[in-house]
Image: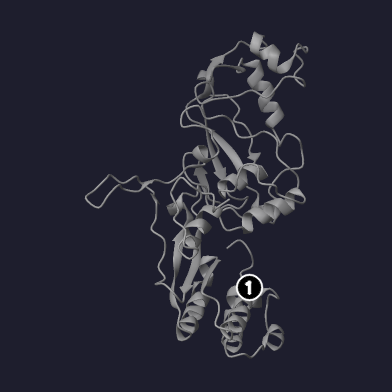
């Protein structure tokens, strides 16, 4: 949706390539000359594998995922697979319906030789459902704050240090963040934690646990630790903006994110704040500037473990995250074919 969408113009050529491959003819070299985007015919590549495996009585099942615009192509795959004896379902699924904190809509194809293909039952809904005669209702979609461990009421400011490259900023503190921290310090917004409770301290106030955590350094702004700000003391309402474009999706931290995608400077995801009420009793308070999302945060919103070992530059990491199938969605799709039961709270398969 964010690119030049040349793949849509090449769809007739991709359909032709799929049909030819299904009959054992590889005409992609000829068709590629007419393609507007050299990557378009990659969508036909699975049929080369499927035809080769079909010739030896395999595979037992197949699951494929792509962006919603690819659904017509999945329908062509489905028609071919049915002639080979597969039960096939294809359609659009929303990852948020399966516990992913992201309304990521994707075209899914499920095919099996040994069982009836059908989509997994959703476990979540936009609005929580009450229990009925048919059993417990679906729980509410997972919001970003819940997934990131921010909590429902004591929601801290987003991580104040992002990485370099597309999706993450190169500077240690994104634009305006250091200024915001200094302003917060001067207003007395440092927080001391006592057994999980938050206590507002006066500016540059020291206490036993502050010294234990931070030492006895001078009250120099450059050496002060970043404050833990909560909704109790900081009236900002945080949202995630999906990119820099005018029509970008903006979601409150209490909601699931929009579809995460990276790979270009215009596709940076940033945390943005707006006053939940006139802050600090003043109309003139400066709202913090946008803070770029980190790779760790983006990975969590894709349902990867927080400590997932991403590799490469920050830009490469963001590309990997944006291109990935959310593990929780994948677990729901694959569990029946792997003959595994998937408990809603058990995502070992996803990890």
The residue positioned 70% from the left and 45% from the top of the image is 168
In the depicted structure, whether residue 86 falls above or below residue 176: below
Which quadrant is home to the N terminus?
A: bottom right
Name the outermost residue toward the left.
133
Q: Is residue 253 visible?
A: no
Expressed as whole percent of the image width and height from the top left, the position of residue 252 reads: 49, 41
Q: Coloring scheme of the render?
A: one colour
The residue positioned 42% from the left and 46% from the top of the image is 141
Categorize mark 1 by other alpha carbons within 10 Å: few (<14), some (14-19), many (20+).
some
Could you say which is closer to the camera, residue 191 or residue 329?
329
In the depicted structure, whether residue 13 falls above or below residue 192: below
The residue positioned 58% from the left and 38% from the top of the image is 272
Expressed as whole percent of the image width and height from the top left, the position of residue 347 reads: 51, 49
The residue positioned 76% from the left and 11% from the top of the image is 216
Please give left or right for residue 318 compared with residue 151 in the image: right
In the depicted structure, whether residue 118 falls above or below residue 279: below
Please give left or right for residue 270 compared with residue 118 in the image: right
Could you say which is closer to the camera, residue 202 or residue 59?
59
Q: Which residue is mark 1?
A: 6
Q: How many marks?
A: 1
């Amino acid at each position: 949706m964010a690119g030049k969408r040349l793949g849509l113009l090449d769809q007739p050529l991709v359909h032709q390539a799929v049909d030819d491959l299904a009959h054992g003819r590889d005409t992609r070299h000829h068709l590629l000359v007419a393609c507007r985007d050299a990557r378009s015919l990659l969508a036909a590549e699975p049929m080369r594998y499927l035809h080769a495996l079909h010739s030896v009585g395999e595979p037992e099942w197949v699951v494929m995922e792509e962006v919603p615009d690819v659904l017509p192509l999945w329908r062509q795959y489905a028609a071919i697979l049915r002639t080979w004896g597969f039960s096939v379902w294809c359609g659009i699924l929303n990852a948020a319906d399966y516990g992913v904190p992201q309304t990521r809509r994707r075209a899914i194809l499920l095919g099996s030789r040994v069982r009836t293909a059908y989509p997994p039952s959703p476990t979540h809904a936009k609005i929580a459902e009450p229990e009925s005669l048919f059993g417990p209702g679906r729980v509410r979609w997972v919001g970003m704050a819940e997934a990131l461990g921010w909590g429902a009421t004591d929601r801290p400011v987003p991580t104040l240090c992002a990485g370099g490259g597309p999706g993450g900023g190169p500077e240690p503190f994104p634009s305006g963040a250091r200024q915001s921290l200094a302003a917060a310090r001067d207003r007395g917004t440092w927080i001391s934690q006592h057994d999980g409770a938050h206590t507002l301290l006066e500016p540059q106030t020291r206490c036993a646990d502050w010294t234990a955590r931070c030492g006895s350094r001078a009250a120099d702004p450059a050496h002060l630790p970043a404050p833990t700000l909560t909704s109790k003391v900081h009236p900002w309402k945080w949202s995630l903006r999906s990119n820099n474009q005018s029509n970008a999706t903006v979601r409150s931290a209490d909601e699931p994110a929009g579809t995460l995608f990276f790979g270009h400077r215009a596709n940076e995801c940033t945390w943005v704040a707006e006053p939940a009420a006139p802050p600090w009793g003043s109309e003139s308070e400066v709202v913090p500037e946008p803070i770029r999302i980190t790779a760790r945060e983006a990975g969590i919103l894709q349902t990867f473990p927080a400590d997932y070992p991403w590799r490469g530059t920050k830009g490469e990491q963001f590309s990997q995250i944006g291109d990935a199938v959310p593990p929780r969605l994948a677990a729901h799709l694959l569990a029946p074919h792997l003959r595994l039961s998937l408990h809603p709270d058990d995502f070992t398969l996803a990890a």
